[in-house]
Amino acid sequence: MAILIAFWTHALAAALFLSLILWRLRSGVRQGGQRLLLAAFSLTAIWAWLNAIDMGSTLAVYAETARNLVWVGMLHTLSGSGNEDGARQRGVRLVYGAVAAVLGLQLAVDALPFLVDDGSTGAIALTAIILRITAAAGALVLVHNVYGQAAPASRTSIRFAMLALAIIWTYDLNLYTLAYLDLSSTSGLFHWRGAVVALTAPLFALGAQREEGWRIRLSRAATFQSLSLLAICGYFAVMTILATALRGTGWDWSRSAAIGLLTAMTVAAMVLVPSARARSWAKVKLAKHLFEHRYDYRTEWLRFTDTVGRSGPSAAPLGERVVKAFADIVDAPGGVLLAADEAGAIETAAAWNWPGGNIASIEPDESRRFWLAVECEGRILELDAHRHGWGDPKDLAITPPGWMLAEASAWAGIPLIHHDRLVGLVVLAAPDYRRPLDWEDFDLLRTAGRQAASSLAEAHGQAALSNAQRFEEFNRRFAFILHDVKNLVSQLSLVARNAERHADNAEFRADMIATLKSSVGKMNDLLARLAPQAPARPERVQPLPLRATLTAAIAAKRRDHDVRLLGDGSLWVDGDANGLEQAVGQLLQNAIDASPTEEPVLVRVARDVDQVTIDIIDKGSGMDADFIRNRLFQPFVSTKLSGFGVGAFEARSLIVAMGGRLTVTSSPGKGSHFTIHLPAAEPASQPARKRA
């Protein structure tokens, strides 16, 4: 019964893979990968047929090894199919080479029974089983990495083929592991092996339909994982082979080998762990010989942008973050950021763990020549090349300052260029392993330099904008104050003219003294408003009575023109007394300037639910809709020859700052009507009314 099961399962597998061969031949074989796939199908069919007619024969054993070798070659072809230039990472080649070497050693071990006497056949058989376990484990590692590191769009195309190979080698791994432990208990598993392989044929058929979509890229992480897993498998395989092959000898070679390996690892750890230079040397050599590229660009870029873009109260200043970001790329211990001041001299803008001395001052002429040369060329400065005279002539044409070459720790200079302008130069200290820079360093550092320059330029722009805003605030205050000073000058001029006629009048003198005191007080207030610490908004918004504020504003204007207060002056509003008096005064002055002498200006107070309105009405020349919409509240726009054009703008700004608003209606020849809307308030002596 067992013989029939073995025959029919393996014969079925042979028939199914023969069908796959015929189907692929009908579709055409145009590429090398397709021919390799056809060869893998053929060897799998031959292996299955040989096991069907004589399971465990020498030819069947050789066919199994050849089948596995061709499938590994197929995986190798897939792993390089996504590289446009056909280059593959060296680390991946080592993995494939190791698995192929195990399969080759397996062929050699299978041939040993024909060359030696019968006394050692048991050890040879166990060694062959161990090699098959190792080969199956290594092949599964390759399948895992090919699928895991495939482009997302291609995983759908290769998943069935990868699943089929995983089934074959997983079964083999478990089969030979059990055979190593107890060969007599696995005979039934060998008989059903053909059925397992037969089940994979439909999966290969589904995967082969979309072979044109098999495009694989392997990352550095995949390479490292493959090497590490294969190294572990190889270590245990070697130890097991030695233990099996030398089981009958008097000398425990496996123990000696393990002790030797442990000693070598201990010595290596003693060298690498305490020595930063040794670690740097090892890192450089591994990156150079095992990987296609030294840097994992995705990881480096994420780390660089995270360091430069870090924010918050605990974050270092931007200049220090920029230096640290570049130092992390090349494992430099520190660095310094240089910038040119307004006079053209180079100065230190920031430093991070800089091991060198203070930056020496450079003559402005020398600084400008060096700065312009770096700005025009945009080349990275390899200072060791300048010190020893080797390197690209274009690089050596840029002469660094003397202090930079004299500073032994200075290693590389990275220009930060934004829109063809050099915004800074990062000078990095030399790492523990001082190596020459290559094209990969130059490309990555130059690209990172443009990103850092953009961040620095943005920070400089923000600082300049902040300074401009402070000047704008000062200029705005000064314009308002100058406008108020003009009004005070007009008031004092009127007092001076009237003093010539009414100086003997005691009431006039008292009024004049009060006016002078009021004007001096207002001028002192105006000067105080120019101070940087002076608030731009009203100091305090609180309930205040309108009568006193409006009376003071009207009294200052009534000497020149008839101003009448109408309505309920006992109302209260939420506002600032000084700001409201100033705003009403500005609007009254504009109304007086626009009104004929005989026409009074009206100030009317009313309450509308939760608001109090203050209307300033004149019968002057009026304004058209276009002027009100586009020019009235624009600063430095005025219809008066001697006007500054900030009165209405300042009045509206003061009212808005108190939480109110200013509206206006006007018609040419019919006068203007300004309305101040402020929140109503209850008198301070009365409790506030409860509102639903």
Image (cartoon, rainbow, N blue to C red):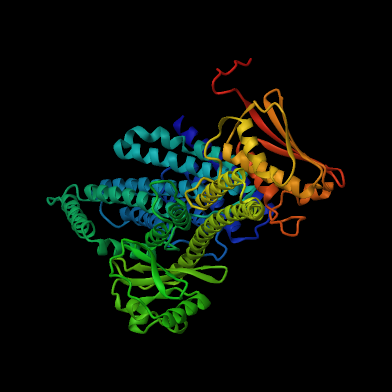
In the depicted structure, whether residue 416 falls above or below residue 149? below
Image point (46%, 29%), residue name: 1
Q: Where is residue 507 shown, x and y percent of the image?
A: 61, 43
Residue 590 vs residue 451, the one in the foreground: 590
The answer to whether residue 138 is visible is yes
Residue 88 vs residue 134, the one in the foreground: 88
In the depicted structure, whether residue 195 falls above or below residue 301? above
In the depicted structure, whether residue 544 falls above or below residue 240? above
Horizontal side, residue 258 vs residue 418: left or right: left
Image point (42%, 41%), residue name: 172
Q: Where is residue 464 shown, x and y percent of the image?
A: 53, 60
Report the quarter where the C terminus lies. top right
Residue 347 vs residue 253, the one in the foreground: 347
Horizontal side, residue 80 vs residue 622: left or right: left
Horizontal side, residue 540 vs residue 94: left or right: right
- Residue sitting farthest toward the left: 250
The answer to whether residue 673 is visible is no
- Residue sitting farthest toward the right: 669
Q: Quadrant of residue 296?
A: bottom left
- Residue sitting farthest toward the front: 504
Horizontal side, residue 161 vs residue 101: left or right: right
Figure label count? 0
